[in-house]
Image (spheres, grey):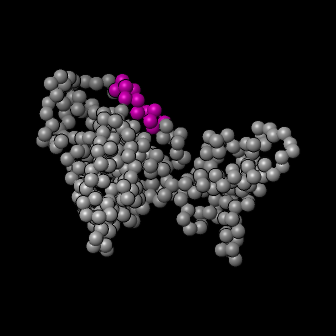
Amino acid sequence: MTQAAIQPVPDQPAPVSAIDLRKEFEAVDIASVLAQLDRELIGLVPVKTRIREIASLLLVERIRQKMALATTFPTLHMSFTGNPGTGKTTVAMRMAGILHRLGFVRRGHVISVTRDDLVGQYIGHTAPKTKEILKKAMGGVLFIDEAYYLYRPENERDYGQEAIEILLQVMESQREDLVVILAGYGDRMEKFFQSNPGFRSRIAHHIDFPDYAESELMAIAELMLTEQNYRFSAEAREAFIRYIAVRKTQPLFSNARSIRNALDRIRLRQANRIVAKLDRTLTCDDVMSIEAGDVLASRVFAEGAAKGA
């Protein structure tokens, strides 16, 4: 449905001239979504600041609509740029919750896709795939990770351009019922926007996700362990601080994602260490504690030493 096609709602409330801001803020309860974002993600202060700014903007827009001061539906499509593991998907989910509570999307769900979900392998395959995904996403948020892979000009038989054209059309004509978030590395997204200016003109909010500092990665690790009822011993904690410093210098480091994968491997080594001695009684402390050896056995240390040599 296009903007011009929107018809007045017969039982639409009459415009108001004054609104209690606190009551309106508490009624939509976006504070709980922002609090959840703070609990889920360590750091990312610039990102959280932008999300709060957007939430405030939309709250005011909601009030303006009630006062019959809003003349057009706001453009809400977004771009999230940054390295892997910096919380882009999590923020997209919380953004969907804010949009839903404020009445800018009907359902508030997130459909997360990549190029493979949108682009077909042969003529006539792309349009149905893309339209099916869009149908599922209507009323919520479509999150396209590594969006720049949609555009492959070096391949004459690539069908990504067809998906792009459909997306651009829907981002404009259905913007009252769908928010699209494009995500990926900053430099690649910039090239993508240069090659596809139609996307840039439809993006209202560009948010950059910084890499985590080493202290933040350590805090993330301890939060993840606490949620799983594990904890570092003092020596293991020191060993993991060293692990982070080494791992950040190695290829394919993915911020919080790499930390989660490291902890999964540490838990495997801890379990193997425990089960190696069957003739004993285990305490809660035994099965909760991560020891230094569980961390230091990682091949990251050997690879780091070899690189230093």
Can residue 86 be spotted in the picture?
A: yes
Can residue 57 be spotted in the picture?
A: no
Q: Residue at x 29, y 64 (%)?
A: 122
Residue 136 sits inside the magenta stretch: no
Quarter location, residue 151: bottom left
Q: Where is residue 79 in the image (x, y as percent from the top left)?
A: 35, 54
Marks counted in the figure total 0
Q: Residue at x 27, y 31 (%)?
A: 63
Quadrant where the C terminus is found in the figure:
bottom right
Along the viewing direction, whichever of 77 and 54 lies nearer the viewer: 77
Quadrant where the N terminus is found in the figure:
top left
User: Main SS type for the magenta part?
Assistant: helix
Q: Work out which residue is located at the far right of the displayed protein and give it.
A: 279
Q: Residue at x 27, y 73 (%)?
A: 156
Above or below: residue 111 compared with residue 293? above
Above or below: residue 171 compared with residue 247? above
Quarter location, residue 146: bottom left
Q: Position of residue 117 (x, y in %)?
A: 36, 55
Q: Position of residue 247 (x, y in %)?
A: 62, 63
Q: Position of residue 210 (x, y in %)?
A: 48, 56
Residue 24 sits inside the magenta stretch: yes
Question: Which region of the structure is painted magenta?
Answer: 22-35
Q: Residue at x 78, y 49 (%)?
A: 275
Along the viewing direction, whichever of 129 and 82 lies nearer the viewer: 129
